[in-house]
Amino acid sequence: MKRYVIVISAVAALGGLLFGFDTAVIAGTLTSLKIYFHLRDSAIGLVVAAASIGCIPGAFFAGKLADQYGRKPMMLTTAVLYIITSLGCGIAWNFTALVIFRFIGGIAIGMASTLAPIYISEVAPADIRGRLGMIQQLAIVIGILIAFISNYYIANASFIFLSLQNHWRYMLAAALIPSLIFFLLLLLIPESPRWLIIQNKLSKAKEVFNKIFDSDKSTVELDAVLSDVKKDSREINFNEIFTDRYKKIVIIGIVFAAIAQLTGINTIFYYAPLIFEKTHVGGSVLFQTILTGIANLIFTIVAFALIDRIGRKKLLLIGSFVMALCMFFIGYLFYARKLDNYFVLIMIFVYIAAFASTWGVVLWVYVAEIFPNRIRGHATSFAVFGNWTANAIVSFTFPVMLSSLGAAWTFIIYGIINSAMIIFVLRYVFETKGVKLEKIEDLYATV
């Protein structure tokens, strides 16, 4: 594996770091926002869900725009939107402005969550595509951890310009620095070679492949992609991905991406301080939140050794089983009011470890690799659209469920959902480990 492909994949994945940062940073601001803007639970749900709602159009249109204008220009657009939202949230003059800028940030997140996996899958050699695709998830969890550390540092800093009334502004604005770095580094990476081939820019595609593969292998790769594209060179429309040829795999992709959110993972990352406030183990809830980010990072790294060895399907089954058990156990602890110990924290950490090493890493790899070349942009957009639609529903409903149903039944419901996911994986998910992108279409035809 050439160092070059690792570097360009890592740069593309920086959008994932900002994705993780912007989605998780809100967790440390909720108590302050509730007091500053006099918010009810439904308003708290709205400010959290605003980013997820913005992700829906961002994800939906990103693939089409990337097919039309290229992967790189759209990633640059994403970086600009990240810059705008970090500045806007920092200076938000009222609650409405904050929600609007969170929505703009959501558009950027939705675009990044579509574009980076597409780009990485299109530059990655088949035998290491899983590990390279995981760079996106690794960047996301690093972004989440940085957000938690940043929140903790700002909340406890003693700078003269910080106060209990304004530290939420600096927490939200902290994404400006990585946003600028992302924009500058994107200027240095090439366009996706597979997109260049679709645009009939063969010489430029060959230049990129030469940097990724040895000279002989780059020619083989170019010929294979060109042959696949020539099978049907017509421009494809959104509605065509639901024709008989593609409908099955597109539906599998959408459902797969959506239920990844129904695991309940983002209820932990978005609302961790609110959950920890309901336990009685003492300590800083922001520090406990940092520990969840560390667990997330450690087990994402562990998954690097697993995804191209064990495969996607087995990881998903193991993850769903462990996560279901954790959610049921957490629900029981809240139901029995046994919260004066560390069992809730331990179960949350085990749950995060299970998600990070299975669904968390497989999600962004799988949705970017299961679709044929000519529909990958459109189809990945639809799949990520499903993911963020589910995310918005979970983000908005969780605080309401927590206050109306109670923590016990809320977590039990998520336990039931995780159990049901095992059936879906067994029936519809097929293994893609080590398979070239141009050959995957043959696999899903037998599902």
Image (tube, helix red, strand yellow):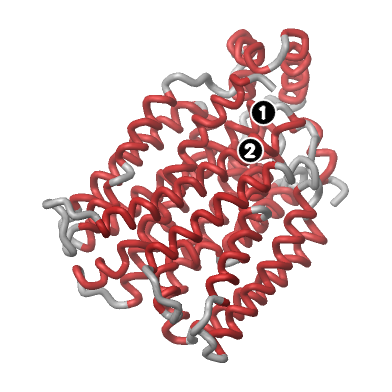
How far apart are the alpha carbons under marks 1 and 2? 8 Å
Res 386 → quadrant: bottom right
Q: Position of residue 254 (x, y in %)?
A: 64, 54
**Towards the viewer: 354 or 153:** 153
Q: Secondary structure at mark 1?
A: loop
Decide: is 31 above or below 59.
below
Disc 1: which residue:
124
Disc 2: which residue:
133
Identity of the residue drawn at 53% across and 71% down: 345
Identity of the residue drawn at 63% across and 26% down: 123
Res 235 → quadrant: top right
Identity of the residue drawn at 57% across and 84% down: 333
- Of the two numbered discs 1 and 2 on the same chain, state the one appearing first in sequence: 1
Decide: is 187 above or below 15.
above
Side of 109 where 105 appears, left or right:
left
Res 373 → quadrant: top right
**Towards the viewer: 433 or 66:** 433
